[in-house]
Image (cartoon, helix red, strand yellow):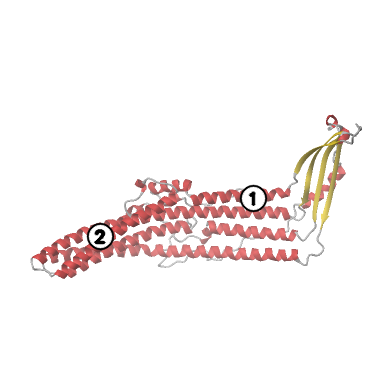
Amino acid sequence: MKTVSAAALGGLLPALALSACSLAPKYIAPTPPVPPSWPVGDAYLAQSEASLPLVSYKEIFRDARLQALIEQALVNNRDLRAAAANLAAARAQIRVVRANQFPAVGISGSAARTEQGGGSSGDGWTYAVQGGVSSFELDLFGKLANATAAQHDTALATEASARTVRLGLVSDLALAWATYAADRDLQSIAQSTVANAQDSVRLTAARLKGGVAPRTDLSQAQQVLETAKGDVASQKTALAQDINAIRLLVGADFDQSLLPDGIGEVSEGLAVLPAGTSSQVLLRRPDVVSAEYDLRAANADIGVARAELFPSISLTGLLGFASDALSSLFDGGAFKATAGANANWSIFNAGGKAANVDVAKTRRDAALANYEKAIQTAFREVADALADQGTLAERLRAASAYTAAAQDTARLTEATYRHGITSSLNNLDAQRSLYTARRSEIAVRLQGAANRITLYRVLGGDQATGARD
């Protein structure tokens, strides 16, 4: 059996050692193009916390009903399944690219029969078995290694994109859940307004019958009643659409007992993320992580393009057997071995390979710009959400005070109207103002819930998982 001599092996070692060489530029993480901390001022209410915690959705969305819906969505949502499939394909592609760094071994066999006629002794079967190493390129300048590294970073970018889908799913479901709660409250307000308007219509009709009120008072009271009835119908539609939206996000039918009764329950079940943390937390956002891995992949592609400028050296090897008789196929005399090497280097290609290096560099520059823009966009989104959070408490206080004042006005006006002191128009205006005030307060409460959900989304939500091949 053939063996490789020590001299031949020693000759290969330097070449193999060169395969560790890489022409890719050293990756240096860019300085984030944003201030080191969030804006401060009256709108931001910066607090004393040194940093924002890395929390899971269960720490932000504390209501057990919402958590149950989220867990169901993480299993059934089709967008999440598609993202998981794309991630699996990206990870498999790493193995495809990495396989080019290793020799491929194959085996083949054949059989042939020769007949010369006349009973010649040369008649008979010939058998052959060949096993060999296909052409194997020595990665002297890191072309194959950098191609694998680029694909690995691309897969990690895909993984970050999958986390973006998951983050969006959790946030969208929480917002749909809160919207349903607000619509429940709006429906309740419309129904109570219908009841009050019906009482007003009955009272006005009695006054009209007694000759105390004009017919216009009854018409105006009926307008308020029909408006409220229309709003009740609209809210029924909104609630049905909210359930449809939640069902789509969950990816299956769900237990409707998991839905909230009102926006107050939602606000109590949402934790508040404080302002005043370092903006470095944005480096954990999935879209920023994805942009950084795209940048790393582009950086590795420069090494691939540079390696194309240098010679390509390939090794081939073949071990085989050939025999005209099956019984002697594996005899020592039937064994043969061949080995070879070849090198090729393009002397002139009109600057095409050098241009490929320039293309790789410009793509890296574009990836860098995209990475920095992703950070800047993230910073703005968080700063906007924090500015909104800083004034929500005052807006809610004002809305609640306005509702209380409108309710008191409506109560007093109705009492004086019943005693004939004020006009029907004043009473109807007071009822309309109360209706508008109550709806506005619900809108502000929904904005508060949406703000907490938005902060969860724009800060990146759950901590990134570890990178995997």
Q: Residue at x 31, y 57 (%)?
A: 235
Q: Residue at x 82, y 43 (%)?
A: 318
Tell me the quarter of the picture where residue 413 sits: bottom left
Q: Residue at x 25, y 61 (%)?
A: 228
Position of residue 290 in the picture relative to residue 418 (left or right): right
The x and y percentages for residue 367 are: 61, 63
Q: Amino acid at mark 1?
A: Gln
Q: Residue at x 41, y 64 (%)?
A: 388
- The disc placed on residue 243 is none
Give the residue number, with chain letter if any, for mark 1. Answer: 93
- Residue furthest front as drawn: 118
Can residue 270 be seen here? The reply is no
Q: Amino acid at mark 2?
A: Lys
- Residue furthest top as drawn: 327
Position of residue 64 in the picture relative to residue 36 (left or right): left
Query: Of residues 97 and 450, which is closer to you in this image?
Result: 97
The x and y percentages for residue 332 are: 87, 33
**How many numbered tags mark residues here?**
2
Query: Of residues 435 and 399, which is closer to you in this image?
Result: 435
Circle 1: element type: helix
Q: Give the vertical position of 79 relative to 47 (above or below).
A: above
Give the residue number, with chain letter if any, for mark 2. Answer: 229
Query: Of residues 271 and 48, which is closer to you in this image?
Result: 271
Query: Of residues 44 and 224, which is closer to you in this image?
Result: 224
Task: Point out the frontmost of discs 1 and 2.
Answer: 2
For disc 1, the neighbor class at 10 Å (few under 14, some 14 to 19, many from 20) is some
The x and y percentages for residue 292 are: 59, 59
Of the numbered discs 1 and 2, the one sitting upstream in the chain is 1
For disc 2, the neighbor class at 10 Å (few under 14, some 14 to 19, many from 20) is some
